[in-house]
Amino acid sequence: MKSWKEFLEQESKQEYFIKLMEKVDEVSQQETVYPPKEERFSCFDLCPYENVKVVIIGQDPYHGEGQAHGLSFSVKPGVKVPPSLKNIYKELKTDLGIDAPKHGYLAAWAKQGVLMMNTSWSVTKGKAGSHKSFGWAKFTQRVLEQLNNYDKPIVFILWGNHAINAAKGITNPKHFLLKGTHPSPLAGGGFFGSKPFSQTNEFLEKAGRGAIDWHIPEEAE
């Protein structure tokens, strides 16, 4: 496989994926579904397959109005920064001394090779976890199979048990699985002091892949 476009074309012919899209479309006709259809796979658009260095696995798209746009933990400019992302910014400051921007738009990371994917790729407005039984787990498994076979070392940032379990198929010893507590305030605070950003860069530099500049421009790109 050479591109996400090729991957999506292959999956779109599979029976599970056809049924999955039918289910999402069916719900979309009756209720508001996030992210918008045109942004459902935007993590692939912003982070081409050949550029992937880091994978951050989230769980569910944000289910509030205007929040989800296809990148896990990220929200569009002008949208209030969610609690989990606030904690990510706090750890970024502690770890690398990088100040948080006033927005929560993480496209600058994606453009450097950080694939920010969720394990469910759609959700009904106001109903957390509402699409997790639709068949997204199979699709996510297929994405991770491609990444497990990637020809260069990748860092998988796995925050919380959900992400850790989702990545059980990542068995290639060249990759680095960085496991830790979820950044949610509900997770009890074990996230702080985990230094995920410096650890990621240390691994990437040793692997000859180059560090990520975790600084996010104040003007959302």
Image (cartoon, helix red, strand yellow):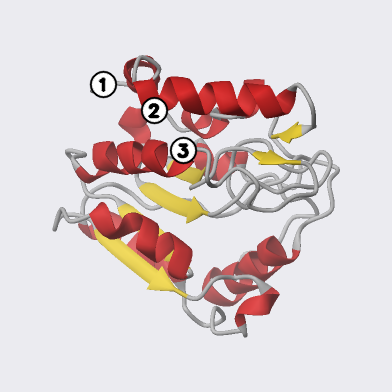
Q: Name the residue under label 1.
A: 2
Verify CB contact (< 8 Å) between mark 1 and mark 3: no
Three-letter residue code for mark 3: Gly
Three-letter residue code for mark 2: Tyr
Quadrant where the C terminus sits is top right
Of residues 92 and 54, the one nearer the viewer is 54
Q: Mark 3 points at which residue?
A: 135
User: What residue is at 62 percent from the left and 71 percent from the top?
Assistant: 93
- The spot of residue 38 in percent (x, y) is 64, 20
Q: Quadrant of residue 3?
A: top left
Of residues 216 and 69, the one nearer the viewer is 69
Alpha carbon distance from label 2 to label 3: 7 Å
Quadrant where the N terminus sits is top left
Determine the secondary structure under disc 2: helix
User: What residue is at 58 percent from the left and 27 percent from the top?
Assistant: 23
Q: Earlier in the sequence, mark 2 or mark 3?
A: 2
Three-letter residue code for mark 1: Lys
Q: In which quarter of the image is residue 70?
A: top right
Q: Position of 204 compared to 188: left or right?
A: left
Q: How would you rate the neighbour count of disc 2 (Cα within 10 Å): few for under 14, some for 14-19, many for 20 or more?
A: some
Q: Name the residue under label 2.
A: 16
Verify CB contact (< 8 Å) between mark 2 and mark 1: no
Residue depth check, mark 2 versus mark 1: number of the one nearer the observer:
2
Determine the secondary structure under disc 1: loop
Determine the secondary structure under disc 3: loop
- The spot of residue 7 in percent (x, y) is 33, 22
